[in-house]
Image (cartoon, grey):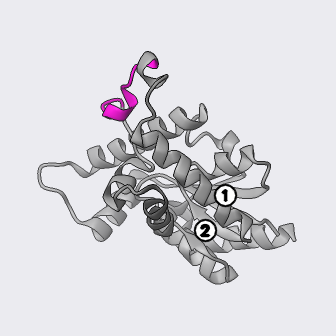
Amino acid sequence: MYPVITISREFGSGGHSIGEKVAKKLGIPFYDGDIVTQVAEDSGYAKELIEEQGEYSSSANKWFDISAASAMYFQSPQDEIFIAQKKVILKCAAEGPCVIVGRCADYILRKEHIHCLNVFIHSDMEHRKERVLQRYGSIKDVGIEKRLAKKDKQRKTYYKYYTDQNWGNYRNYDVALDSGMLGEETCVDIICELYNRKE
């Protein structure tokens, strides 16, 4: 079997929920919010900052606007958080089979030659809108499609910055699943089947 399953996902596609169900079905640990807690303990940064900076960024993010000259002398909180997250992800993988959501885990583990089942979850806009509204509710004066597009753009920027690869590109994953068409349960079954077949 694969030692680790990584779940990358479009915002609102249900990647967190699918990853959690996969872990439960396989009887292995699930890491998403737990990584934030561990990074907060290790780095001293507040959980709120880690949640904000630990997977999202944009061209407007001040930590990404540091000039090359300044970067020679200054390591940004964003970089420190990434390094701390990397250590936690590698520790989780070293402890045994598990499911890890987001945070460039697919790239981090691949660079360390840790064989993983890397999954990308995506969906059509209508299913994503419905899921986000159910889970988070609406935000006044913010269109739901604009909110989804912004989150995805921030993830793309973050992933590109730390991996020099394109987030969502099928070449970076072993399998891409459309949760809107297949449904969460089918996605869970497919991932578990692939995981067990490797054994």
Q: How many marks?
A: 2
The magenta-colored residue range is 59-68
Tell me where residue 143 appears, x and y as whole percent.
21, 48
In this picture, is 16 found above or below 147? below
Tell me where residue 79 appears, x and y as whole percent.
48, 40
In this picture, is 136 found above or below 139? below
Q: Is residue 89 left or right of residue 144?
A: right
Kindly identify the amino acid type of the residue bearing the numbered disc 2.
Answer: Cys
The residue at which mark 2 appears reads as 187
| Residue situated in front as seen by the camera: 14 or 76 | 76
Element under label 1? Answer: helix
In the rendered image, the quadrant that contains the C terminus is: bottom right
Magenta segment includes 37 = no
In this picture, is 181 found above or below 1? above
The residue at which mark 1 appears reads as 90
| Residue situated in front as seen by the camera: 156 or 197 | 156
| Residue situated in front as seen by the camera: 78 or 73 | 73
Q: At x 59% / y 51%, what residue is drawn?
A: 86
Which residue sits furthest front?
A: 73
Tell me where residue 47 appears, x and y as whole percent.
36, 61
